[in-house]
Amino acid sequence: MRVSKRCQYALRALFELSLQPDGRPMKIHQIAGAQKVPPRFLEVILNELKHAGFVDSRRGSEGGYVLARPAKDLTVGEVIEYIQGPIYTPVADAAKHRNGESLLGDYAFQQLWRKVSDAVSGVWDNTTFAELVEYEMAKKSSSALNYAI
Amino acid sequence: MRVSKRCQYALRALFELSLQPDGRPMKIHQIAGAQKVPPRFLEVILNELKHAGFVDSRRGSEGGYVLARPAKDLTVGEVIEYIQGPIYTPVADAAKHRNGESLLGDYAFQQLWRKVSDAVSGVWDNTTFAELVEYEMAKKSSSALNYAI
DNA sequence: TCCATCTTCACTATATCAATCGACATTGTA
DNA sequence: TACAATGTCGATTGATATAGTGAAGATGGA
């Protein structure tokens, strides 16, 4: 599954918010700086994430964004599907253009794409942001160790 | 993984050639007609498939295209990867733009995309065109049966 | 009153993809 | 040998999606 920049930035932003231990809101430019996302673009994206209910925002000088749910209850899959729509299924799509006419191969390819899409969602519906953070921290400390040695 | 039309047409064409029992070459317009592919576009695609070594061609009035290998030795995966290039891996890509600078999250997302890409190639590297044909035929005869009842 | 988010609309590149055109090369057959 | 069918190849067009910017004003908290 191809993942657009917009979507990658969304994931990065949520990852960054997941790193925030206390309930302190993060400002756009903080997130943008930390994850190298164009700030203006991030603004648009965070807005989407707010409407989706993934983050909450607070205005004013102490404002910013916070996760709307704990990171362990937020999967990568729901975010990607919200941003990009459902995983692409070519056959059903193509069949519409042919107004219902079916071709030899439709069944086989239908099944193939279904298998692929199941495999993909199997991965990312079972990955939470808490897990991402945990993995990152483990990996980071082990690579720091390597430097020390 | 997003699959372009070009790639779908390529798969359709190879599927159609896999259906051909004897070694008789099929003409472009036959394939195009059977699988509803724009003939002119198919011409370009079959050319690519020839260079990749997936099909052979014969010129002249009795010419056309044939599979270069038996359908049971041809996987969906190799075709897709040839047409679209390797499965998309955002992190490595992005790291180049940052000239080597790493971000907090790189490890975690790297692993995530890797899992996804493994899941996907696990499906299509293990699917041959012979299997697609077999599945299609089984499904087709069972649905014909349903009509009869 | 300052700061930062929210809302909205528009606008420009850029890239990719789908599809087509036109000219040329090759082969089988009459 | 000449014709007709077919494959080969490079260039070009048009559509669509994506990435990212710009500007203006409204809202609300410290």
Image (cartoon, coloured by chain):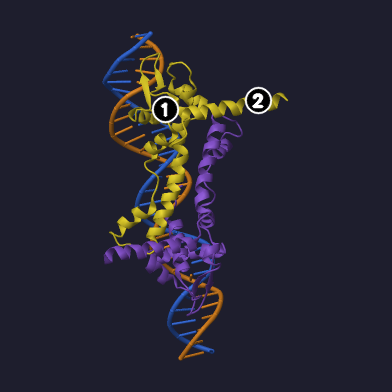
Chain colours: A yellow, B purple, C orange, D blue
Q: Residues within 10 Å of mark 1 (few under 14, many from 20)?
A: few
Q: What residue is rendered at 43% in x and 63% in y?
A: B41
Position of residue A92 measured from the top left corner of the image (x, y, whole percent) = 34, 53
Pick the front one: A94 or D15: A94
Which quarter of the figure is the C terminus of chain B placed in? bottom left
Q: Nearer the viewer, mark 1 or mark 2?
A: 1
Vertical order, B84 against B114 (above or below)? below
Secondary-structure class at tag 2: helix
Which residue position holds label 1? Answer: A73
Q: Is residue B104 visible?
A: no
Q: What residue is rendered at 61% in x and 33% in y?
A: B100
Mark 1 belongs to which subunit? A
Which residue position holds label 2? Answer: A144
Q: What residue is rendered at 46% in x and 38% in y?
A: A124
Secondary-structure class at tag 1: helix
Q: Residue furthest front?
A: B149
Q: Are marks 1 and 2 in contact (CB under 8 Å)?
A: no
Position of residue B110 measured from the top left corner of the image (x, y, whole percent) = 55, 36
Mark 2 belongs to which subunit? A
For residue A38, side relative to residue D26 (left or right) = right
Distance, label 1 to label 2, CA atoms, is 29 Å
Amino acid carrying mark 1 in the image = Asp
Q: What residue is rendered at 27% in x and 67% in y?
A: B148
Amino acid carrying mark 2 in the image = Ala
Q: Is residue A127 visible?
A: yes
Position of residue D19 measured from the top left corner of the image (x, y, whole percent) = 45, 38
